[in-house]
Amino acid sequence: MSEAGSFIDELRALERDAQDAIAGTSDPAALERVRVAFLGRREGRVSRILRQLGGLSPEARPAVGAEANRLKRVLRGALEERERHLARKRPDAGTPAPDLTLPGRLRWTGARHPVTRIVDEICDIFARMGFTRARGPEAETEWYNFVALNTPLDHPAADEQDTLYLKGGGLLRSHTSPVQIRILEEYPPPVRILAPGPAYRRDTWDATHAPAFFQIEGLAVDEGITFVDFKATLSEFARRFWGPGTRVRFRPGYFPFTEPSAEVDVKRRVVRADGSVEETAWLEIMGAGMVDPAVLENVGIDPERYSGWAFGMGPARIAMIKYGITDIRTLYENDIRFLSQFA
Amino acid sequence: MNVSRRWLQAVAPGLDLAAGEIAARLAMRGAPVEGITDLAAEIGGVVIGRVERVRRHPNADRLSVCEVDGGNGTVQVVCGAPNVRAGACYPFVPVGAVLPGNVRIKRVRIRGEESRGMLCSARELGLGTDHRGILELSGQFEPGSAFAPAVDLDDHRLDVEVSPNRGDLLSHVGVARELVGEGGLRLADLPGAVEHELTVRSGSGVVDAGGVRVRIDAPRQCWRYMAAVVRGVRIGPSPEWLASRLRAAGAQPINNVVDATNYVLLELGQPLHAFDLAKVGGAEIVVRGARRGEMLQTLDGERRRLDEGMLLICDPEEALAVAGVMGGGDSEIGEGTTDVLLECALFNPTGVRSVRRALGMSTDASYRFERGVDPAGLERAIRRTVSIIVATAGGEPAPILLDACPRPWRAPVVTLRPGRVGQLLGVGFDAGDIVELLEPLGYRCRPSGGAIEVTIPGHRSYDTLREVDLIEEVARVYGYDRFPDSLGAFRPGTVPDDPLLRLHDRLRTTLVGRGFLEAHTTAFAPAEEGEVEVLNPVSAEESHLRSTVLFGLLHAVEHNFARGARDMQLFDMGAVFGVGGSGGLPRETNRLAVAMTGRRRPHHWSAGDLPWDEWELRGLVEELLEVVLPGAYSVEPGTFDSTFFEEGCELMLRAADGSAVGGAGKVRADRVDAPVWAGPVWGLELELGDGAGEKPDPAFRPLPAFPAVERDIALLIPDSLPARQILEFLEERGGRDLVEVSVFDLFRGGDVPGGYRSVGFRLRFQSSRRTLTDAAVDRAVRRLVHRLKEEFGVEPRASAAGSGR
């Protein structure tokens, strides 16, 4: 028997052993052991035979080498096929697919306060009409809170807003209107601002009253601003805020710092669950009016040349209307079950 | 102001409108109606009952058993009223009928006697507040007939909201004027009332006639004082027409003389007061300021100490009444009164207001004087009152009306330019239009050149004194709804969007994005949480202004703990106050507060919970500081507010100049009322300044062209040395190519000696000019380790760097 022949016989015997061993495996781990035993780089039986190739005569080497390579190919194919077979036979074998019906990892959902949502919404609408936001102190003087706003302290109008006074001087502003004065003192017309912020009154807490509440002041002062501009701007706002089809009504009202003064009401169109459309009752949404000439004079602006309009709105009340909240105290309890509803 | 529809129609005969339509019209004139009560509907089931016989209840002293004819034969009724008598008629509710308030009358036994129905008091019928006895009707009635028409109750009561500038609307005539105009008004004839021939005798300070004298010693406070005398009256209940009219307007009938004054108050808006002339010493009225320590028992039975200078109506001896506010008990009209002195005066509104405030009482009279009583209406009012008194109480009026008038009223004249009307309203009105709009309200207009001279009527002489006031009248009468609302062009304003509000937006976006809920707390705080005191607080809990925002947020945490919540992340932004600001005001600054507790992410079935801890807090602190003070802050252990945070677990936040801007840490257990199951609460309080210093636009840096090389080193750092110092040393002095330093490990125990911890730093080297070789990087690391040893005395950990624990 030639050198090559005995080698090839050995390889054939090895092939049979390997085929038997592969066929006898019942799980992927056993199959892997078989692979290592036969094809492993160091200790595999095929590798050991191949390492002896070096001792062969140059004539014998090609035939044995070819046979060894064929053997490797055949065994790899057999291993792969067996692997597929085992995988088919044992579907629960290996890592199971994740059950993606389970919930994922969540984060807490943050939310702006409902009143902030309303304030932002209002400021955004007015921003598109050229308004910027302004701010003033919450502790104020009688001059800014009353007198400069044409409200003499000895007039019953000063009673309408029962004011909280501070020891050592000053008071808590009873409305955001003092910002009108502060801004007009600092900036020349044209002025188009919105001033959101807290205001304070000597009210005890109940379902509709709070001693601290948010207000938004609006102010426009320029040459040639008229009652028609006033109506137009606020009507435009109301339709954008309350939705198309909203009707807006201006009624005469009274504020010492506006003349003419107006109460602004809206009547909304509400789509019911069954798809029908219904109009609400008239809702009072703001007090407003043309800036009183005395206010302009108090800040050194010539009322014969300049005119303007102003409004005050309560975003808490609007939030209550819009979101169906019945008790204003809910807005200040900061119950997370409430706050998280506005995410 | 309670307005009776019938009364309104009596003074405005052409006003043929239902109550609802009247309300709608008034709303568009600036006097909205808060509510409408149908007076008849409320008592639809009440009939006239005539009491036939009365006997004492056998088992109860205070009860009577009556035989009442309610139209369906006689029934037995048990009655508790002391004034029930046989032969009189009363409102009667038979069994099965309903009283106001939805009370259904049933057949009952009271102390053994059957009662089939109820005789009613005025209050039980919603007609007034009198509950002293059942309502005896004067006149002849058919038993069983409906009660409402019998007492003329086919009426509605409108609750009209009157703004403080419109004192003229505090009367039926005033409200009617708005609806029908001056020309449609007529003072109704009243049963039995006739005009008496009375002559007015005027003087500036003192007047007398017929033995009665009026003297005004305080002409700045009392502008006019008219007095009339009626002698020989018989005090008694008012006739039904008068009583029912008062009741319809929500007033309580008292007696014929007082009712006459109230009638005129409600009809014309002029407060009047009736004195028992016999109680006016010397028959002389002196109007003067109160003396020091003077006392007066007012009609409501209270004995009041008067402040010096308060305006009083007196006789030469003592005070009789607080002018314009309330009468005194001594000179009150009573059953024995025969001669009446009637006061019809005009007081300074601000004087009445300050007295009313000082005494803490408001009456129908003071309410009207404060808002302005028609200075031209006194004579008409006193004449009408005299007529009514004589008609209902008899007597003879003294022929002279006394009129002390130190400050005669002259109608103001205001110039109105039609051009200015158009300039402000945006719609042109010519002079003719304007006159047509104004005159029905009593303004008299006289064109003069291009303008109009407008004479202001007395009833508007308090609030319509300027051109712009008349322009409002033009707009109001024309109708606000008739102005177009076409949006015109506008110029952008000069005011920049407020930086603090912009900062609020950015912080809100950051925090809401991280799962925080925005809370709204108020600026009020109890004494221990604030420096600035409120002088007239609503409650002790709200007696001061807060000096931190966090305290209110911790209250919110407690609120939620009490409702079983374990996990929460809250924030709020607002002003805090301290003493010593400028201009006598408190110092006011703006802050952000954050509070969180429990898990920082919701529980997931795949892993354990992740609670908030100091590292989450510190990370959040730096993230927020980056928003507030981009790149210009530092954070270090330290105490910002020792009352909030646990010692040793507090961070001090500083601005670039070193000033403290806030603190953060683990909230002390005694600051939060937490249930046993609650986790620690973490908090932060941060000054926001004025919001200046918005993050500048980023400057682009070219992306690195050469690869980075990383090396890990573990250093043994003694516990006394803050690791931050090593970190900063590496960052600042690690050389140009050391682009990033991070901490990847902290380890104690094992081969690490006591008093030390091993801190693993990951160094990332990268050059913008070449590929760094391993050898070069190793050399750089060795150099750094050496310098750290020199600088801080720290050694590398003996085991291989980065090989784990």
Image (cartoon, helix red, strand yellow):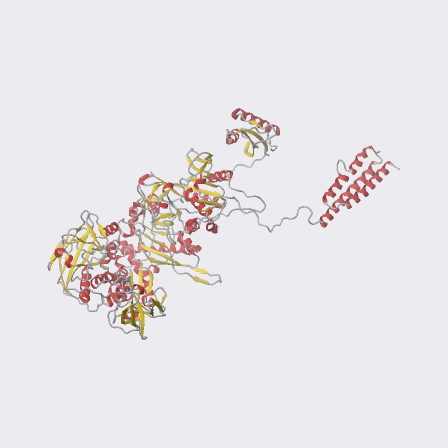
Quarter of image, res A232: bottom left
Q: Is residue B747 above or below residue A15?
A: above
Q: Quadrant of the N terminus of chain B?
A: bottom left
Furthest-right residue in view? A1
- Please indicate whether residue B667 sits to the left or right of residue B780 in the image: left
Give the number of marks: 0
Q: Quadrant of the C terminus of chain B?
A: top right
Q: Considering depth in this image, is B711 or B193 the residue closer to the camera?
A: B193
Q: Where's residue B633, x and y in %? A: 45, 35
Q: Where's residue B661, x and y in %? A: 42, 37
Q: Is residue B151 visible?
A: no
- Please indicate whether residue B312 sits to the left or right of residue B615 in the image: left
Q: Where's residue B724, x and y in %? A: 50, 32
Q: Considering depth in this image, is B456 or B59 the residue closer to the camera?
A: B59
Quarter of image, res B42: bottom left
Q: Considering depth in this image, is B668 or B659 the residue closer to the camera?
A: B668
Furthest-bottom residue in view? B73
Q: Where's residue A2, x and y in %? A: 88, 37
Q: Is residue B441 above or below residue B505?
A: below
Q: Is residue A43 visible?
A: yes
Furthest-top residue in view? B790
Q: Considering depth in this image, is A298 or A189 the residue closer to the camera?
A: A298
